[in-house]
Each structure stands twice: as structure tokens, then as C-alpha cells.
Image: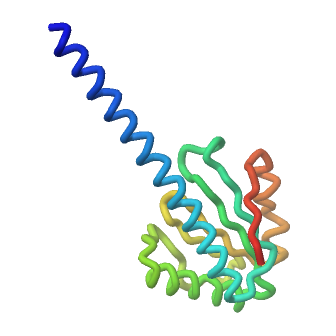
Amino acid sequence: MILILILKIKYTKQLLDNKEAIIVKIELEDKGQVLRLADFCLEKKAEDIVVLDLRDLSTLYDYFLICSGTSNQQVKAINEHLIKKSKAAGFKIHYYQREDDSGWMLLDYFNIVVHIFEKEIRKFYNLETLWSNAKKISIDK
């Protein structure tokens, strides 16, 4: 009986260790993905790119990537470029917009949400202030 209990404890610990390793791997993959998405945005000359780490604040999303375009046409171009490059990189997109003249386009990658704004629309919604408790991840240009 004692031997069975010891084996159960060791097996349970091994399962927990594996689960923790999987969680760390997923977190690293998400961070790498959000940084690649930021690079894709830079390829289309997106401005004021900010990545917010929401892992301590939200159970829905791990990261927000927020960027701006100077016109609705540039916002659409950044959006289309992200869709194309994401598919080529093998990133799974849960939801994205194709045509929209609102000045705000969104791509949902399950754990990451990309917000692409026209500058004035971004100032109005001010997501960075709304999520001011989030850690900011710097993006090297």
C-alpha cells in the first residue's frame, strides 16, 4: 500500500512537472509569435507599435499588439500583410476582418489580439490607458 502511494506521488509530480514545462513552452511560443507579428507590422511601416503583456490581467488573452497607420488604406494594407504573412508562418488566426472603413481592424490569434488603428481612432479608444496596468514589451525597430 505504501509503495503504491509513493508511486502515485512520484507519477503526479512528474505530470505536474510536464504540465509546467508545457505552459512555459506555450508562453515562449506566444511571446515569439507576438514579436514576429510586430515585425510583420513594421514591414508595412506601421507606427507606434506597442505590445501589452496581459497574462497577469486577463484570462482571455495573453498579449495585445497595438499599432497605427497614417490612413485607412495603410490600416487595410497592414491587415492584409499580417493575414498573408501569418498564414505563411503557420500562425492560426481565429478571426480577422477583410474590409472595413472604421479605421480599426482586428486580428484574433486566440492568445494574441492585434489592433490596427488609424491615428485619430487610436487616440479616441486609447487602449494603452485602458490597460495601463499591463507590462509593455519593447519592440526593436
Q: Position of residue 52 (x, y in %)?
A: 70, 57
Quadrant, the C terminus: bottom right
Horizontally, residue 42 falls left or right of residue 23, namely right
Identify the residue at image location x=65%, y=78%.
Answer: 39
Check the image and report above or below for 30 versus 18: below
Q: Residue furthest front?
A: 3
Q: Position of residue 110 (x, y in %)?
A: 48, 60
Quadrant, the N terminus: top left
Q: Residue furthest left?
A: 1
Which residue is nearer to you in this view: 14 or 45? 14
Check the image and report above or below for 45 versus 17: below
Identify the residue at image location x=76%, y=59%.
Answer: 127
Residue 38: which quarter of the image?
bottom right
Color encoding of the figure: rainbow
Q: Position of residue 72 (x, y in %)?
A: 72, 87
- Label count reads 0
Identify the residue at image location x=60%, y=82%.
Answer: 79
Identify the residue at image location x=47%, y=53%.
Answer: 25
Q: Position of residue 73 (x, y in %)?
A: 70, 91
Check the image and report above or below for 98 versus 55: below
Residue 21: which quarter of the image?
top left
